[in-house]
Image (spheres, helix red, strand yellow):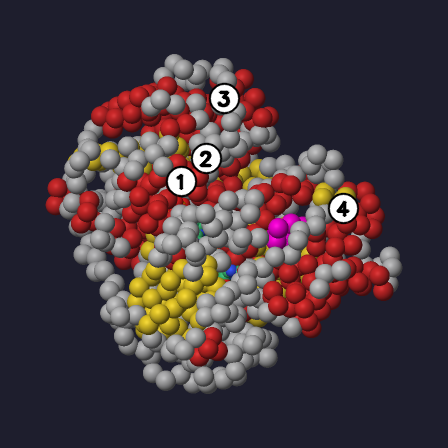
Amino acid sequence: MKRKQPRVEEADEKDLKVEDHPKDWAAGIPGVYYSMKPAVEHMGVERTARTVLKMNQKDGFDCPSCAWPDPHKRKTFEFCENGAKAVTWEAAPVIIESDFWAEHSISELRQRSEYWLGMQGRLTEPLYKPAGEDHYRPVSWDEAFGIVGDKLKSLDSPDEAAFYTSGRSSNEAAFLYQLFARGYGTNNLPDCSNMCHESSGWAMGQTIGIGKATVTFDDYADADLIIIMGQNPGTNHPRMLTELEACKETGGQIVAVNPLPEAGLKRYKNPQKVRGVAGKGIEIADQFIQVRLGGDMALLQGVSKRVFEAEARNPGTVLDQAFLDEYCEGLDELRDYLLTLDEDTILEATGLRSEEIDELAARYIAADKVIITWAMGITQQKKGVATIKEMINLLLLRGNMGKRGAGASPIRGHSNVQGDRTMGIWEQMPPTFMDALGKEFGFEPPREHGADSVETIRRMRDGEVKAFVALGGNLVSAISDTQVAEKAFENTDLTVQISIKLNRSHLVTGKEALILPCKGRTEIDRQATGVQFVSVEDTVCAVHPSWGSVEPVSENLLSEVAIISRLARATIDGKIDADWEAFEHDYDLIREHISRVVEGCDDYNRKIRQEGGFILPNGPRDSRTFHTPTGKAVLTVNDLEYLVRPEGTLILQSLRSHDQWNTTIYGFNDRYRGVKKGRHVVFINPKDIIELGLEDGQNVDIHGVYDDGVDRVLRAFRVVSYPTARGCAASYYPEANVLVPLEQVAQGSNTPTSKQIIVRFEPSTHTAPSQHDSAAVAQQPEPDGFPERTPAGDREGINA
Ligand SMILES: Nc1nc2c(c(=O)[nH]1)N[C@H]1C(S)=C(S)[C@@H](COP(=O)(O)OP(=O)(O)OC[C@H]3O[C@@H](n4cnc5c(=O)[nH]c(N)nc54)[C@H](O)[C@@H]3O)O[C@H]1N2
Ligand SMILES: Nc1nc2c(c(=O)[nH]1)N[C@H]1C(S)=C(S)[C@@H](COP(=O)(O)OP(=O)(O)OC[C@H]3O[C@@H](n4cnc5c(=O)[nH]c(N)nc54)[C@H](O)[C@@H]3O)O[C@H]1N2
Ligand SMILES: [Mo]
């Protein structure tokens, strides 16, 4: 089973190369090649066949990568390059040997990159770091559970503990985990969603009464117009490109709104089609709108304003008045506000020309069925919640909700982040859920809202949270303000990580620390009553089973469900009416409880066994029912605000390269953007490079600009001339988290503003990358508005 520990070379950034032209298309044959090659290399042919070919099949496991849904009719290869990477990373049969921990101290491992740590292989033994020591040592499972139970029982208040969840765990594990936390007595259930789509949940909950997509999978192909805002599907949701292609094939149009000309938004070569493999692929975006970072709120208001103006010119022809009368409130207030909105402010905030907004408005008005879809470019902005409310406004004006081919579609990140929420992983679940939970398990759940991710870090820093348990994830790397986050972890008495692989959150520890290794989703889960499956929910509310398909990398591993059950027994045995031991043996028992507690999940055990699972009810989508206080969808007035950057600064966003899964770094190439063998780059518009007195290829230190007296800086990052919008820059996440103060959050959702960081640059005296890829060739922007990369000074910048 086990292979020899790999020799992993750290990338030192000195071989970093930047190609002259970023790619203008995504996927195609290279996609398939790039996905299969490492899989076969690391897992061998048989294990590759058992994993990659089972991915997203009805009898297989749900891809542990993103939350994009599966079609009804599955293809043989129902996965993308990134799914294959995620599976290879998890299922490659390489384990960390016991002597590793004596050989490597924690402080030594802390010097290693996330890439190196992840490549060491799977964790297979519970590990314990006693107070005052710098090494983990293997311990028995019983000893490990005892340490956690004793600590949790010794705290003065249950609110001195926090229970974090990342979005990869199953519905069954998530349900038990929140039950454990609430049975113990706290709502401190921070999760990765707090840093991700929290803004979407808030905005949609307040306006249409549900924080989930109002579309189904089929709606994509049916839409007349899809507006993609703040999302990079070519890298982060590649299978979405197939649906965008389907939409185009039936005459639909696509508009991409983004400061960056991302490859997948431009052209797509479908690897499943002959044309996609051999030809030029299909043009995706009919209009590319190169908005400034954080300018989307102004853009959407500008479009809605034009909709009202068009209605005023031709009364009764533009608005869906019947829909608005029956289902919505707030129309007059919105009209009054938008018709007085200053056009120059809109142009200033967006960095766009008036005609570009006119064109989008004309497309919107001409289309009967419109979907607006979005991701982190919107949610991680200070005005993220308000911006999403503006999307809802625009959709409602023409009745684009609760009909085929139309709706609001936030695209979730983690494969089961939405399911975790449905199961109760939220620091502020509503009273109806708490009532049902209390009734089912014979206890009084805590009612006071708990701490989210940012608040948990603050409480750990300030000594208010003393024990931290994480069901997956890598919070220290994922959260903003890295220095503060590290202090917070170190200030905690006990940190516990339930994980499959080593990451930084195992090395920046509390005084005591534990690692509890679990099975991954690819692995067969045998329990006393036989092989178990789990269930997950995708981004369009479809719930389906997931069966592991390969032997676990070690017999010593426990499932997440087993770990949570045993943690609960060690901590709150007998306190609530729950048979923890039985749960571990038979997951159907957990699902029976779910069916009585979670809305929409009645008869769960039967429905989950139907072919393809089932779809959760959704008021706006199914029947134009809006669970708001008045029962109507709410058109909202949101005062326009945008970030004004001081002279000499840029607004920086932090995003994903093509070779990573959040904090997991698979490699050092960002193929579509033309970066190789390094991550320490900052993409800047050529005109801004000149204006700031910098040079393409130069090394700079990037300083966060805040007046709280803390110097937040990234050293020796290479300037890459890139056709991003003027005034904007981009670097990779998680590195850039160093620059974001913990207090910089989106209004309403408390999500760190990872896409809106004001920075200034200084020439770096630190050594790092060198070699640049020759003098670049000047290129004219293409007619469709997707610019090419050009070195500073060679031509006019984009969107000047
Ligand atoms: N391969 C891979 N897949 C993933 C992930 C991964 O790390 N790797 N992560 C998963 C997770 S958890 C998530 S949440 C999703 C994230 O999916 P994305 O949201 O696509 O992820 P990001 O890389 O953060 O890209 C943000 C995009 O928004 C744009 N953007 C930034 N700011 C603005 C703005 O102000 N306005 C507009 N209009 N656009 C803006 C950026 O240029 C970029 O194209 O992907 C999921 N899928
Ligand atoms: N600056 C900046 N910061 C960001 C973002 C950004 O765009 N910019 N994006 C934010 C977003 S959208 C998100 S979702 C968060 C992500 O935050 P997290 O979800 O906390 O981080 P991940 O990197 O996805 O977690 C990876 C770890 O999960 C563990 N893991 C993997 N699979 C399993 C499993 O099956 N079970 C268990 N128990 N553990 C497993 C592995 O040990 C792995 O190291 O980061 C946020 N932070
Ligand atoms: Mo995410």
Q: Earlier in the sequence, mark 4 or mark 2?
A: 4
Residue located beneath label 4 in the image: 330
Is residue 508 placed above or below 438 in the rendered structure?
below
Quadrant housing the N terminus: top left
Q: Residues within 10 Å of mark 4 (few under 14, many from 20)?
A: some
Q: To which quarter of the image does residue 341 belong?
A: bottom right
Left or right: residue 339 versus residue 504 is right
Mark 2 secondary-structure assignment: loop
Residue at position x 33%, y 61% in the image: 714
Q: Which mark is residue 445?
A: 3
Q: Which span of residues is magenta-colored?
A: 386-392
Q: CA distance from mark 1 to mark 4?
A: 38 Å
Left or right: residue 758 versus residue 747 is left
Q: Which mark is residue 458?
A: 1
Residue located beneath label 2 in the image: 451
Count all numbered tags in the image, as a single digit. Answer: 4
Q: Main secondary structure of the magenta part?
A: helix
